[in-house]
């Protein structure tokens, strides 16, 4: 599998630090409002990358934070006359609903910045002790000049930045030694949430959050760090500086960045006001259509949002679902014989589409080509599977389409009621997940069952379940 690494600007063979395991950190949203479909792009594309790696047999530890302390959250809280916590809790819950609608799997861990302040203070202290950071009247800055590799991710010329960019000297930060220095800790202003620290009662800067959460949940060195391309500079550049200076080790092996979702060829963003929230889109379309639309382009290509492209995505998805439902219909009436020799041969042809799909995804997650492979398979099924085929063959073709769609997080079949034995199997898996302290997976299973109207009761005699 090859991935394009922003740092080396090349596609590189993917070799995880620990064979068979992938540690992945994706910068999450700042939660002060409903997410817009631009924010949804990294969620969908990196969830797809995760699903593909799982399909290849990797165990993926996927961490994505919520930034729940920030100027914009505080401003919104003041506007509504409520606490910042109330705002962030509300929009985390809404964001999770949107993620579920888009079939984005919950991360293994979704840390919250406000729950990790201790770790941040510790990292800042280490940076001060090592001479990489300094305190001026309660504000702590990172001493960028001391990190010789600063700029290695964004390939920026630092002298140009320094001389040309006086605006980096943000008001209130004029005590910095250098315009490129950035804030690790800032003292509170009246009415803001704050935490005690050795430097001042205050709150962390944005960049330190991710360095600390990645370290705590994934370790000092991680395989993949991802986010939208607007995060390359300064956010990810600063994360590298903090983590590498603190830990004395390379931080992330591969840096992956998605291009923007545009509207009229301009970045969709809250500040420009040219956005649609995921919630708005869900009123007009099945969110699966949104997911399909996002995956119809390569994640590193800019993607322009338009009603026409959404229509095309709706049609494409419909074509796949029709094929799956036709196969389901054929299945009901098919003979229960074992596969014929002819069908065995045909199955090899069917599997060739999976090879094509895998090749596309192995090439830096080329979802556009992967979808093309699914369409070819659908076309093949439409013209080669008929009422004369055996159940085993029809089932195998149908399963193959559903499976490849599932790798992309696309739901190709009508949700069917779970059979008793499937429920028992999921409960068993949940018990094992709990034993292995994989509570995220255990919760995921409980929620999955809940969606199907099945509630679990943990009793002394074991787990009982009932249908609603
Ligand atoms: P924010 O809440 O602005 O920090 O953004 C959360 C994530 O969404 C980051 O990874 C951003 O890079 C990404 N993002 C924001 N706007 C867009 C957009 N228009 N297209 C693609 N990604 C975006
Ligand atoms: Zn981040």
Image (spheres, rainbow, N blue to C red):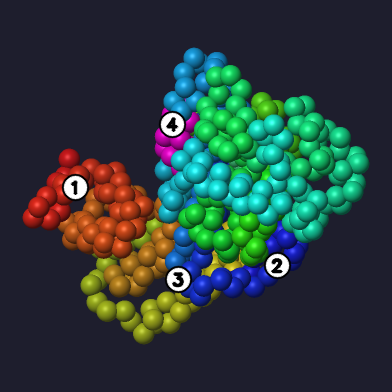
Residue ID for mark 3: 57
Pick the residue in front: 33 or 184.
184
x and y percentages locating residue 232 in the rendered image: 71, 49
CB contact under 8 Å: marks 3 and 1: no
Residue at image position (73%, 60%) is 7
Residue 424 lies left or right of residue 290; in this view the side is left
Tell me where the magenta segment starts and ends, as one range: 87-99
x and y percentages locating residue 174 in the rendered image: 80, 31
Residue ID for mark 1: 456
Image quadrant in which you'd find residue 245: bottom right
Secondary structure mostly seen in magenta is: helix
Question: Seen from this angle, which residue lies furthest left?
Answer: 461
Q: What element carries label 1?
A: strand
Q: Looking at the rendered structure, which numbered label has been put on residue 11?
A: 2
**Image vertical order of residue 405 relative to residue 169, above or below:** below
Pick the residue in front: 292 or 440.
440
Residue ID for mark 4: 89
Q: How far apart are marks 2 and 1 (CA)?
A: 46 Å
Q: Distance between the residues labelled 3 and 4?
A: 35 Å
Q: Is residue 316 visible?
A: no
């Amino acid at each position: 599998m090859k991935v394009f690494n922003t740092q080396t600007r090349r596609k590189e063979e993917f070799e995880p630090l620990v064979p068979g395991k992938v540690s992945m950190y994706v910068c999450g949203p700042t939660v002060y409002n409903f997410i817009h479909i631009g924010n949804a792009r990294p969620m969908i594309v990196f969830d797809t990358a995760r699903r593909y790696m799982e399909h290849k047999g990797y165990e993926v530890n996927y961490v994505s934070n919520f930034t729940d302390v920030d100027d914009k959250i505080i401003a919104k809280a003041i506007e509504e006359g409520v606490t910042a916590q109330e705002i962030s809790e509300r929009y985390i819950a809404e964001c999770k609903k949107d993620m579920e609608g888009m079939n984005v799997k919950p991360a293994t861990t979704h840390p919250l910045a406000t729950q990790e302040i201790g770790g941040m203070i510790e990292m800042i202290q280490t940076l001060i002790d090592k001479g990489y950071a300094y305190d001026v009247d309660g504000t702590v800055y990172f001493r960028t000049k001391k990190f010789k590799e600063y700029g290695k991710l964004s390939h920026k010329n630092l002298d140009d930045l320094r001389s040309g960019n006086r605006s980096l000297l943000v008001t209130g930060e004029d005590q910095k030694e250098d315009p490129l220095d950035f804030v690790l800790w800032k003292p509170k202003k009246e009415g803001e949430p704050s935490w005690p620290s050795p430097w001042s009662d205050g709150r962390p800067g944005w960049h330190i959050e991710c360095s600390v959460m990645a370290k705590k949940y994934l370790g000092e060195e991680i395989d993949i760090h991802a986010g939208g391309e607007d995060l390359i500079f300064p956010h990810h550049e600063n994360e590298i500086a903090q983590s590498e200076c603190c830990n004395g080790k390379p931080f992330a092996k591969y840096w992956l960045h998605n291009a923007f979702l545009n509207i009229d060829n301009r970045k969709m963003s809250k500040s420009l006001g040219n956005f649609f929230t995921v919630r708005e889109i869900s009123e007009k379309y099945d969110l699966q259509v949104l997911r399909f639309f996002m995956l119809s382009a390569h994640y590193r290509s800019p993607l322009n949002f338009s009603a026409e492209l959404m229509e095309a995505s709706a049609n494409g998805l419909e074509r796949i679902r029709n094929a799956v439902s036709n196969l389901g219909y054929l299945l009901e009436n098919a003979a229960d014989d074992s596969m014929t020799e002819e069908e065995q041969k045909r199955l090899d042809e069917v599997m060739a589409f999976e090879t094509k799909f895998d090749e596309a995804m192995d090439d830096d997650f080329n979802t556009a080509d992967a979808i093309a492979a699914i369409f070819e398979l659908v076309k093949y099924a439409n013209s080669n599977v008929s009422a004369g085929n055996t159940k085993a063959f029809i089932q195998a073709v149908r399963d193959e389409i559903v499976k490849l769609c599932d790798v992309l997080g696309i739901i190709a079949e009508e949700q069917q009621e779970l059979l008793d034995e499937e429920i028992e199997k999921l409960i068993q898996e949940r018990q094992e997940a709990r034993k292995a302290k994989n509570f995220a997976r255990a919760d995921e299973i409980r929620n999955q069952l809940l969606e199907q109207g099945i509630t679990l009761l943990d009793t002394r005699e074991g787990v009982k379940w009932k249908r609603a």
